[in-house]
Image: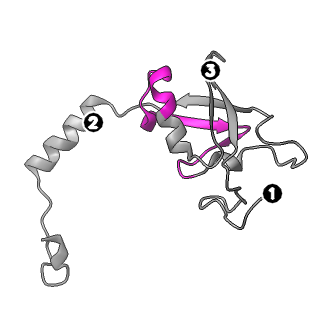
């Protein structure tokens, strides 16, 4: 049933008709359900984060998604975390996912960094050796 095409991020075989998987998403700390979504199995974790951002009331860049005991990379696809028991179609098994909220940078740190860049701009001490830094 699988063609010769493979997922670019995980190398798993993909069919010509993309299977849909159900992802049940909950907060890691409280266990409260955020959403249950059906998406294509080859969708990247980043795309899933963008889909969840509104319901989670958290920007995608400040979320980490956990599948089992592994934090997913943004470039991974959902097929990596789907069931590896090929006797059961992946459409039938939901994938459980926990969301961890990352701490955004503090405003004082951003302000201090901006001030330091304005006050002490970086200069190139070796313009003959590193002309691209001009």
Q: Which residue is mark 1?
A: 1
Residue shown at 58% from the left, 46% from the top: 43
Query: Is residue 53 on the magenta stretch?
Result: yes
Marks 2 and 1, the one that precedes in the sequence: 1
Mark 3 surroundings: few (<14), some (14-19) or many (≥20) residues within 10 A: few
Q: Which residue is mark 2?
A: 109
> Cα distance, mark 3 to mark 1?
40 Å
Residue 129 spot, x, y in % from top left = 19, 83
Q: Which residue is mark 3?
A: 29
Mark 2 surroundings: few (<14), some (14-19) or many (≥20) residues within 10 A: few
Residue 110 spot, x, y in % from top left = 25, 37
Closer to viewer: mark 3 or mark 2:
3
Residue shown at 68% from the left, 39% from the top: 20
Farthest residue in the left direction?
119
Residue range in magenta is 51-75
- Under circle 1, the secondary element is loop
> Quadrant where the C terminus lies?
bottom left
Residue shown at 49% from the left, 21% from the top: 55
Farthest residue in the bottom direction?
128
Quarter of image, res 36: top right
> Cα distance, mark 3 to mark 2?
27 Å
Q: Is residue 126 left or right of residue 2?
A: left
């Amino acid at each position: 049933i699988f063609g010769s095409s493979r997922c670019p991020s995980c190398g798993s075989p993909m069919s010509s008709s993309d299977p849909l998987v159900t992802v049940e998403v909950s907060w890691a700390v409280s266990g409260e359900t955020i959403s249950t979504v059906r998406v294509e199995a080859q969708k990247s974790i980043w795309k899933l984060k963008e889909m969840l951002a509104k319901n989670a009331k958290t920007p995608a860049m400040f979320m980490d998604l956990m599948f089992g005991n592994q934090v997913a990379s943004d470039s991974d696809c959902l097929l990596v975390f789907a069931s590896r028991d090929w006797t059961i179609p992946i459409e039938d098994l939901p994938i459980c996912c926990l969301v961890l909220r990352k701490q955004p940078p503090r405003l004082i740190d951003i302000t201090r960094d901006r001030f330091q860049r304005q006050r002490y701009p970086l200069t190139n001490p070796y313009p003959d050796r590193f002309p691209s830094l001009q």
